[in-house]
Amino acid sequence: MWQLFRFGQYGDPNNPGYGWFLKGIRKKVGGKSIDLVLYQPAYRLLGSLELVRALSLINFYECGGNCERIKDRIMEELAAIMENLERLLRGYEADFAIVGLVIVDPSVGLESIIEAIYDAYGNTEAAIFVVWTDPSGQGWFVCIGSGCGKMSPQQRKEEACRQAGLGPNCNFREWIYQKPSTVEPPPSDNGGPVEWTP
């Protein structure tokens, strides 16, 4: 619960990516819950230069070091969100969805989860973020869905930082996901966005 309050208290009025309105905590949808529901009435997508009414739906997870053990829970909760997404967008008068799955403890075991999300929702119009920190302390995120292309690389990074309750210049790195034939861990260098093509 601490992460929810930390996230809710952070805001930078000079940064257009922040300043979201809190619309709900632990909202029930499809028999599951969404930890945070946030709304931004004038969110500029810096990749497509569109001005949208954005709905941000974020769930937080503790993996205990290995997320593989809660894969079913993560996928079931994401399915509940995605099956009800159009209704949620209408209900909050929004036209763009950002879904966040934020792992709050340093963890491994995300490869099969990311692949499953890509297989199930790779063609969604939303932007689905998976945000985590590896055991070395490096923050990572991947963005899945066509909504990701409407955001600039910097905006995607800022969005991942926001979901994790951090400032917009946090040290997170992006995996540019491409469907693998065999899944491998991310490279260990400290460059910019990483193309994950095993």
Image: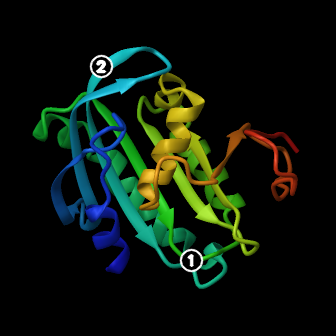
Identify the residue under disc 1: 105
Give the percent coordinates (x, y) of residue 81.
Answer: 33, 52
User: Which residue corresponds to mark 2?
Assistant: 51
The three-letter amino acid code for the residue at tag 1 is: Asp
- Considering only order in the chain, which callout, 2 or 1, is on the residue closer to the N terminus? 2
Residue found at the very far top of the displayed protein: 49
Q: Quadrant of residue 152?
A: top right
For image coordinates 42% across by 52% down, the residue present is 162
Q: Taking 167 as reference, is 59 above or below it? A: below
CB atoms of marks 1 and 2 within 8 Å: no
Nearer to us in this view, 155 or 94 = 155
Asked whether residue 35 appears in the rendered view, the answer is no
Quarter of the view holding residue 105: bottom right
Residue depicted at 46% across the width and 73% down the height: 61
Across and down, in percent, residue 32 comes to 28, 67
Residue at 20%, 43% in the rendered image: 88
- Please state if 134 lies on the left or on the right of 120 as rendered: right
Q: Identify the colour scheme used.
A: rainbow
> Disc 1 versus disc 2: distance between alpha carbons?
34 Å
Q: Residues within 10 Å of mark 2 (few under 14, many from 20)?
A: some
Say which residue appears at 46% left-offset and 54% top-offset: 167
Helix, strand or loop at mark 1: loop
Q: Residues within 10 Å of mark 1 (few under 14, many from 20)?
A: some
Element class at badge 2: strand
Residue that protrudes farthest toward the front in the picture: 14
The quarter of the rendered structure image containing the C terminus is top right
Please tell me in which quadrant of the rendered image residue 7 appears. Answer: bottom left
Q: Quadrant of the N terminus?
A: bottom left
Callout 2 amino acid: Leu
Q: Is residue 120 visible?
A: yes
Label number found at residue 191: none
